[in-house]
Amino acid sequence: MVETKARHRGHGEDSIYFDATKNRYVGAISLGFDGTGARERRKVRGKTKQEVRDKLKVLHAELDAGLRAPAGYTVQAALEDWFAGGLSGRSARTVKLYRDGVAPLAERLGRKELRKLSAADVRSALASLSEHMSTRSIQIAHNCLRRAIGHAEAADLVGRNVAALVRPPTGCEGRPSKAMSLDEARALLATAAGMSRSAPGADERARGAYSLHAYVVLLLTTGMRPEEARALRWDHVDLDAETVAVWRSDRAGGDTKTPKSRRTLKLSKMAVDALRERKAAQAAARLKAGALWHDTGLVFTTSVGTMLDQHNIRRQFRVITKAAGLGEDWVPRELRHTFVSIMSAGGVPTEEIARVVGHKQTSTTELVYRRELRPVITTGAELMDTIFAS
């Protein structure tokens, strides 16, 4: 009779044992020791030994491919690593935009281990979001997840980018941008001017809104982007020549959206007058603030000279639209849409409108900003003075 001895596990071989506390078999792979001398091990669990052996094979394949994701490395951890190291050179505002954009998707997938994430998981999560989010919001969320997993893939933390295999679904129809009619634009200008004159006795929200008079006039009569107006400096405004140089914006690096967006515009008479009033009001605010004043050189500032926050501007702008009888569902960017519509109704050709508002292509003017286009020849500042002469 031949005796057989139980073979002991060789050095470097995997171990499989039963964990009574979890009622599961556990398979462990030894990865040696880390820099502190502590043993590194990767574990898998299953109901049967065969299930554990299969999982160990997959784990070995990942290790052979050079993947070294720590145990429990989740989708949320991958997103945080991307926010921290994959967005260098981006502004804090851009990072926040991405954080907010991917948050609904992270709520559904964030706790899942990255290496266990499947394309089906991503597709299912996006489908659930499509029931109450716009197509654009879904695209932003999917793009952030895809880039975060790509960042992890480059760091050998995952084998493939499953988000790149998924095409985001169509979501709900978002709120379309709109433009004011000529009568509505006139009412807005009159109200903004009236609030400017009555500011000292106004309540706190109205006092904030009154300082936007020149801001409203400038956006409505030049088509400037809100971020361009927020970053506008006095040394780029020539009130004697009645021009404004749009060379900066409140974006990462301070540059305009595109090279084509850098432009010098003729100002309408009403814009010049409003900017003169703004300059005088700012000088008074500087004297009142004293040592608290920040000399930023900006045209539109807070009471201590710092840049206006876009969210505060939006709230204050809605105070004006409400007072003008237009409701509270307007945003400053729609003054740009209004400018394009008024220019179009006044007979300015598409090419000229695109040049004034800084569009790279006329198709953007036609498809995104157009409300009415007629092929007649005229130009900007003079047209605005004529339309709003009353």
Image (cartoon, rainbow, N blue to C red):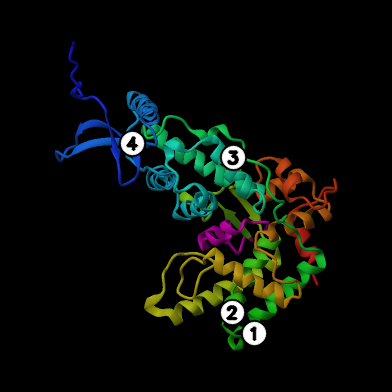
Query: Which mark lies nearer to you, 4 or 2?
Result: 4
Q: Which residue is tagged 2?
A: 205
Separation of marks 1 and 4 at Cα, in angstroms: 78 Å
Q: Which of the two discs, 3 and 4, labels the residue nearer the N terminus?
A: 4
Q: Could you say whether the residue bearing mark 4 is in a helix, strand or loop?
A: strand
Q: Is residue 74 left or right of residue 103?
A: left
Q: Based on the picture, tell me whether residue 382 belongs to the magenta stretch.
A: no
Query: Which mark lies nearer to you, 1 or 2?
Result: 2
Q: Could you say whether the residue bearing mark 2 is in a helix, strand or loop?
A: helix
Seen from the viewer's position, the closer of residues 157 and 206 is 157
Give the image location of residue 304, x and y in percent: 45, 74
- Residue 123 bears which disc, if any? 3
Q: Which of the two discs, 4 and 2, labels the residue nearer the N terminus?
A: 4
Start-end of magenta stretch: 222-242
- Residue 198 bears which disc, if any? 1
Seen from the viewer's position, the closer of residues 296 and 236 is 296
Q: Which residue is tagged 4?
A: 25
**Rendered residue at 69%/80% (across/down):** 194
Mark 3 surroundings within 10 Å by alpha-carbon count, few (fewer than 14), some (14 through 19), many (20 or more): some
Specify the amino acid type for callout 3: Arg
- Residue 52 bears which disc, if any? none
Q: Is residue 225 above or below residue 142?
A: below
Specify the amino acid type for callout 4: Tyr
Give the image location of residue 166, x and y in percent: 58, 35
**Rendered residue at 40%/79% (across/down):** 290
Do tag 2 and tag 3 residues touch (Cβ < 8 Å)? no
Separation of marks 3 and 4 at Cα, in angstroms: 32 Å
Q: Based on the picture, tell me whether residue 241 belongs to the magenta stretch.
A: yes
